[in-house]
Image: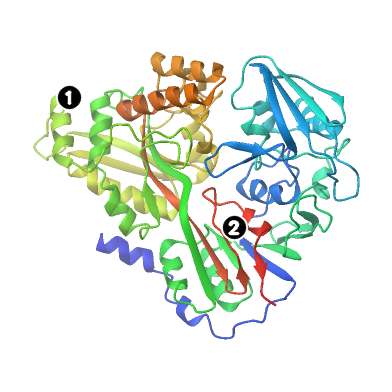
Amino acid sequence: MSHLRTLLVLGLTMLPVAGCGHKQPDPNTVTMLIESSPTNLDPRIGTDAQSEHIDPLIFDSLVRRNEHFGLDPWLAEKWDAPDLKTLVFHLRSGVYFQDGQPLTSRDVKWTLDSILNGTVVTIKSGAYRNIASVNTPDAQTVVIRMKQPDPALLWNLCDGAFGVVPYGSGRDFWRHPIGSGPYRFVSQQIDRDVVLERASSYWSAVPHIERIRFAVVPDATTQALELQKGSADVAVNALTPDMTNVLRRDPHLAVEDGPGTRLNYIVFNCRDPILKDVRVRQAIALAINRPLIIHTLYRDQARIAESLLPPQHWAWSGDIVRHDYDPGKANALLDAAGYSRGASGIRFHLGMKTSTDETVRLLSVILQQQLAQIGIALDLRSYEFATFYADLTRGAFQMAPSRWIGGNEQPDIFHYAFSKAGFPPRGSNRGFYSNPELDALLDDAAAATDQARQRDDYAKVQQILARDLPAINLWYLDTVVIHSRRLENVHTSPSGNFEFLRDATVLP
């Protein structure tokens, strides 16, 4: 581990000297660092992290997530579900787009219809495929009828997933998007920046920040230097834990951190001759020293995960089998499974495919060392991300590290990730795990109209997954916001989104 610690701090030696020559920032502009340009600021199209974080500042959704990952009213003051296949939204009045046009039910209908009828070409159409019709009996009412019950639909109408666009918005809308959110779009230069300005006529609380410039800086070390020089004001979940600890000592900067929902996990191919034995999967989980990895690799900026859902979630259940570090029990399970050690001490070989991301590669080396202690030889293969992801989606792997960002904040993720109906390409059950009992519970949760029944179903689902281990939940990464001290009232969100820009203030 000492060798890995040395690797982690390489490249940090320049940071302590970068604070000299601190720049005087523009008093009216906050510069936020992002790793890449948003691919498309049309909320009907963009699915990358930058698009989904910036879009809610420009556009409003029908409903919004709360701190327990339930849904609260937003553009819709309230909604009704007269039956399992109907949603009726009652829109608030007095909402205007940034060009002065009123937002009505016609705009909501256009937004959904244009996604479904091909007016815009978008992979998001799959999220709304169960919509049979959208009707507007009056300017403030939207009636959505579904082909079949769809518990995920409400989630697909919330912030980060959905934003209402003006009636008639076509394929070139992304060039100059117009929404009803707290900031209006000014400009975008690909691979350089995105500029937003405060929407002074916003229907809810008007932001304090006059202008935001999202500057594209892909390299983490360069981001750290920009923060130290004062040429940037804020970065979210962008720097390594070691860089963050260095910047904590800078008197011009502040670091806010808190529990996050970004989940790191390892997926197993459950069709593999070795890994189809649940005892092998359980042994691997018991052989991973998660507290040590969190302390060493992530500098304690992560928290152990026992479920796909974050602990703040209303459907999260702590009543599950835990997999605390216990190599003795892991060895006993492998012995019982009939995998005895050979003369070299090795029971069998397993392959793990990874991307070329440096933190992922370091994690893989640690896992290789820890599994060797129970007689498993882990053979590592790194690929550039497109190749790695292609193999992952078609099940061409034995083990693979992966992560959920945002998707694990809704309980329907269990259906997408672990049901038989979620086998690729229809879903993300890339390990081809199959359990009829789990599928029945997910169907029951989808048909339930009260949250108590859903919570009971999802608790049982989490118990099954903790027992069968089609994937090992490793840890939730903390949300870390590093900002200049002229930026105040900065609050972290578990999702790591940019919502704090609605309330943050700038010192004169």
Nearer to the camera, 45 or 97: 97
From mark 2 to mark 1, how far is it between C-alphas? 46 Å
Query: x and y percent of residue 348 in the render?
Result: 21, 33
Crowding at dot 1, Cα within 10 Å, few <14 / some 14-19 / many 20+, comes out as: some
Badge count: 2
- 228 w.r.t. 203: above or below: below
**Picture layout, residue 338 above or below residue 359:** above
Instruction: State whether residue 83 is above or below residue 241.
Output: above
Is 273 left, or right, of 56 in this rendering? Answer: left
User: Which is nearer the eye, 168 or 204?
Assistant: 204
Q: Which residue is mark 2?
A: 35
Q: Quadrant of the N terminus?
A: bottom left
Q: Quadrant of residue 263?
A: top left
Q: Residue flagged by tag 2: what amino acid is it?
A: Glu
Q: Secondary structure at mark 1?
A: loop
Quadrant where the C terminus sits is bottom right
x then y, percent, for residue 202? 80, 53
Q: At x 61% / y 68%, what residue is drawn? A: 488
Q: Amino acid at mark 1?
A: Ala
Q: Which residue is mark 1?
A: 337
